[in-house]
Amino acid sequence: MKILAIETSCDETAMAVIEVQSKKRRTKNEEKIKVLSNTISSQVKLHAKYGGVVPNLAAREHVKNIGYVFRLALKEAGIWRHRISDGHPMLKIDLIAVTRGPGLGPALLVGITFAKTLAWKYNKPIVGINHLEGHIFSNFLKKIGRNSKFEIRNSKLFPILNLIVSGGHTELVLMKNHGKYELIGETLDDAVGEAFDKVARLLSLGHPGGPIVAQRATRFKVKSLKLKVVGKFPRPMEKSKDYNFSYSGLKTAVLYKIRDLKKEGIKITDNIKNEICYEFQKAAIDVLIQKTAKAAKEHEVKSILLSGGVSANALLRLSLSKVAKELSTNYFQPELEYTGDNAAMIALAGYFNYKKNPPSRKTSEDTDWKSVEMDANLGF
Ligand code: KG4
Ligand code: ZN
């Protein structure tokens, strides 16, 4: 079956088409997944001058771009244009999946309204998807045109511990079985991606800060301990007994460090900026690694799965893969092209939800398009 997905929860207008072929092997279903198109129109440059995403501006841009992104996604997947048959328009897809939360309300509504309109006009089933569940499923996607297996069917992988890290979320989610999610830890204030973005802003490095701070950190070379001026940043909640995180204190520590250095008459040179990025990144990632390792041990998980925008971070990928090796668990991380917000991951989560709980069709002319509702604070 072919699934069209729509994602507009933040500052990317994204649409994708994936194809899932299901085969029965002995007693089991085995699926082959192929991404046919994965179109993303990013508003990053537009929001950069405000230092963060402005919700109403994001919604306005989604409205402007969504028609174009739709045509492009269908063209690339080879299913444009829709045909008129017996006076009825046709769209050669079998299911529509759309992000219904969490995210920015005005931005989410654009994608949801577009998806509902398509479902109504072309009489297609529709499922509303949790954006974070989408990030989890990004782990099972391969490059456009390549086949991947839907490994989540393999019961030997469970329990799975998910570390979801993005601009809005820092969560540890335990999956004891297919589709069963339990939130066991989360940030009490800022998300880790948000902290990267704020540190970049403090150092006037641009937006979004994650990739820039990470790149700056690699440029810092520890030539001599004497030449280091920044020192270690705190690891917030490192010793707490729960699996929660806190990143606003770390950001403030960076702010104070810059202020103190200036007071001492030290100029914030490019090299000192690199050192701050290096020390900040180390502190931010250290806490993620420690809490994930602790949760993995205590819940005796068989797999660790990383996802969300911050999963593009090279230090995090390397450190977490080492933890998994030490604990002898399976380890999954998404391909780099699926770490950020995209619709292919929403399509795969859509397929999974559709199979689990097929939406009802009241009459042949009336799908349940009305049932999908926006929830900006949707959780697990
Ligand atoms: O999942 P995502 O694309 O959007 C949200 O749902 O929030 O995540 C975006 C976040 C931003 O905060 C961005 O700075 C961060 O992911 N990010 C990174 C890296 N690449 C993106 N953070 C650290 N290192 C990176 N390489
Ligand atoms: Zn995201």
Image (cartoon, rainbow, N blue to C red):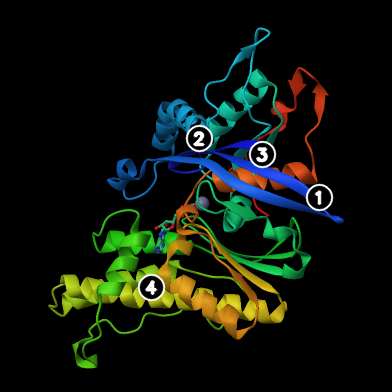
Q: Which residue is mark 4?
A: 281
Going from N to C along the chain, the mark reached first, 1 or 4, is: 1
Q: Is mark 1 within 8 Å of ligand 2?
A: no
Estimate the spatial distance between the alpha carbons at disc 1 and disc 3, rounded to whole Å. Answer: 27 Å
Whole-percent x, y for residue 372 in the image: 68, 34
The three-letter code of the residue at mark 1 reads Lys
Instruction: Give the numbered dot on residue 106.
Output: 2
Whole-percent x, y for residue 169 in the image: 53, 58
Q: Which residue is mark 3?
A: 128
Whether pointer 4 and pointer 2 mark residues with C-beta atoms closer than 8 Å, the reply is: no
Disc 1 vs disc 4: which is toward the camera? 1
The three-letter code of the residue at mark 4 reads Gln
Q: Residue at x 25, y 59 (%)?
A: 205
Estimate the spatial distance between the alpha carbons at disc 3 and disc 2, rounded to whole Å. Answer: 16 Å
Disc 4 vs disc 2: which is toward the camera? 4
- Which quadrant, please, contains the N terminus? top right
The three-letter code of the residue at mark 3 reads Gly
The three-letter code of the residue at mark 2 reads Pro
Estimate the spatial distance between the alpha carbons at disc 4 and disc 2, rounded to whole Å. Answer: 32 Å
Q: Which residue is mark 1?
A: 24
Q: Residue at x 47, y 57 (%)?
A: 309
Q: Is residue 271 left or right of residue 304?
A: left
Estimate the spatial distance between the alpha carbons at disc 4 and disc 3, rounded to whole Å. Answer: 35 Å
Q: Is mark 4 within 8 Å of ligand 1?
A: yes
Q: Residue at x 58, y 58 (%)?
A: 139
Whether pointer 3 and pointer 2 mark residues with C-beta atoms closer than 8 Å, the reply is: no
